[in-house]
Image: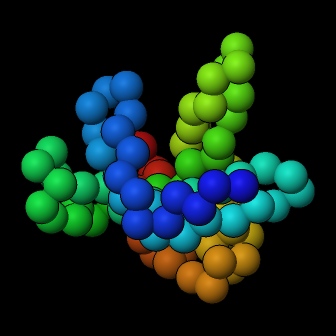
Amino acid sequence: MTNRINQVMELADGKKYVIIKQAIYKGDTYYVSLRLTDDEENVMEELVIFEEVDINGQKSVKKVNDYNLAKLIFKYVGLSPEDEFNSNNNN
């Protein structure tokens, strides 16, 4: 596993996230991330967990929308931001 903590990832839609925590759970890799402004100068109030997935041999990420899994990952990495997760994933 490559340590990706403090690295910035840019999604296909142009949104940028900095990885603040990383975990392996049941063989899958998860990244707890904060959204950045386009210029990467400021952190936005959006906390997201991504799961690393393999698509046709290419590593990619997908957003974790399962509340129970997200709660478990937050606890696993030593965080407990239930309020932030709820406010960002009810759309």
**Does 41 appear above or below 16?**
below
Instruction: Please state if 89 lies on the left or on the right of 14 as rendered.
Output: right
**Residue at the top extreme, as displayed:** 56
Tell me which residue sits at (49%, 66%) in the image. 5
The N terminus, quarter of image: bottom right
**Does 83 appear above or below 40?**
below
Q: Coloring scheme of the render?
A: rainbow
**Residue at the front extreme, as displayed:** 2
Instruction: Please state if 46 lies on the left or on the right of 39 as rendered.
Output: right
Tell me which residue sits at (81%, 61%) in the image. 25
Of residues 88 and 41, the one nearer the viewer is: 41
Tell me which residue sits at (52%, 58%) in the image. 4
- Residue 44 appears in which quarter of the rendering? bottom left
The C terminus, quarter of image: top left
| Residue 2 visible, this orientation | yes
User: In x, y percent, where is residue 55?
Assistant: 67, 20
